[in-house]
Image (spheres, helix red, strand yellow):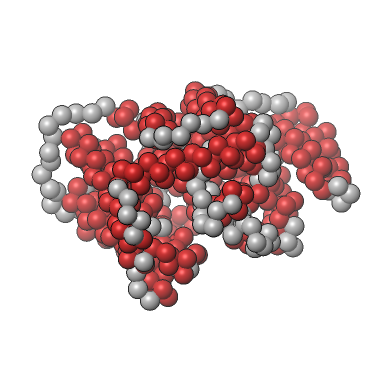
Amino acid sequence: MLEEIMSRLISFLQKEYERSYINQCIDAFFQKLQVKELPRIDLFRLPERIVSPYLFIIVFIGFLGLSDHRLSPMGTLGVIMGLCGFLVGIFSRRLKRPEISEKFFFPLLIGFIMCMIGLLYDWSFFLKISLLPLILLFLTGKYTRELFTMVFLGSLVILYKGFWGIALPYVLFSLLFLATTIHGSLFDRNIQGIAFFCLVVGLLFWSLDALLFGGFPLLSPESRGSLDATYTMLSHLLPIGCVMTIIITRNRTSSLILVCGSVVLMALLGYRTQVVLVMLASCCAAFMVQVISGTETVILLLGTGGVAVFLTALRDVILQTRIGIIQAIQTRISLTLDIYDMMAEVGGILGYTKGQVYVAAFPYFARMMPGIAYSPRWYIAEMVGMNASATSTILGPLAVDFGLIGIFSGMALLGYLLSRLYWRKTPLGISLYCIVLAYAILGIETGVVDLEVLLIFFLAFLYIVTKKE
């Protein structure tokens, strides 16, 4: 009943949207992007697999090689566990979901309800226990949409009441399970609308952010903290929309204009990460849909690295650190790995902070831990005795929160996500793959702890579990 109602509602909304004035404006916008293309430089060819998920491993190993500091045995073991987990995730993409007989549905449902009652007595214990029957209920494949719609709505009510520790796992799991009941083509057909939305919203909030700041923090990077965090996060939709537009239009000229515009706007906010993200994700996207040749890909990748080095040098000049460019990069990498090493020692096998670093990525939750969790990087900085935001590689937060087990599991999920996206050759799949890959590569140094990045990864995960046509 519910599935039929939802199908009719989605079909109705889709038809209304296609006839709407907004859709006509979006079509006109993308038609105007079809302009005369620039000539190609095609001296040699490159296989598409150079931008496969294995690129992450190559960059990670190269990053480790730039450090002049040795890792402790626990830190080294963490790196090995992380790389092995990533490979396991890549090879797991063909695994099929296990199934449980439908006759177990009602006994499992009774067990889940009993766990819900148990939350009134010991929510920490019964919260962990209740996730097992919840997952098993999903594996029965019976009443999936009806059951998890109710779980999702109920958990939203609990979340609204302020009991986020109880509600958050149910929100995430119910969304993940509900996504398996939706056809991915629903999003694939509307990628133009998604891209246009990202471009418009990103540009709008970039403008608001600059207006509230009263200028551009590029020449004063120490004052970036004065930017509005929410506006800055929403302005980062601009690079995402730029990557999607490259996939949609497949026009060299308009793609170049969009990338250059995004690079300039992101640079004015003083964030090197977003500048490199635009260039790296756009380069991968353009190469995968053959907008640029292999020769141009190499040139652009070298240019991306050059821009990253230039922005690092510019920041050092402004802050008057008086050290060379190569030394600045090597010192930063060594410091980052030293911090990771400490996190690995503290986290051990099962972790120390049990998720608090990632919880600090949510501003509302971070404010509930005053003095420590201004953000995940500030949380780690407090732990190592620093007075500034600290990066600890992509493994550091996993290590201190969940230990070696968390490193292996987290990297396995990342490898699985990238592998599934890479082989989902739809415009939206390619767009998400390039964005996630770029964030993952940048996260090797900065860590994947920003709220916007975690949301993008989660939304990408929801997309890969949707039904294929």
Does residue 458 show up? yes
Q: Residue 176: percent from the left, percent from the top? A: 60, 42
In the image, is 332 to the left or to the right of 349?
A: left
Query: Which residue ends up furthest to the left in the rendered image?
Result: 39
Question: Vertically, is 155 above or below 440?
Answer: below
Image quarter of residue 134: top right
Question: Vertically, is 405 above or below 446?
Answer: above
Rendered residue at 47%/66% (across/down): 225
Q: Residue 272: percent from the left, percent from the top? A: 36, 54
Query: Which residue ends up furthest to the right in the rendered image?
Result: 121
Nearer to the camera, 81 or 381? 381
Nearer to the camera, 67 or 223? 67
Nearer to the camera, 230 or 180? 230
Q: Residue 303: percent from the left, percent from the top? A: 23, 45
Q: Residue 465: percent from the left, percent from the top? A: 54, 37
Query: Which residue ends up furthest to the front in the rendered image?
Result: 322
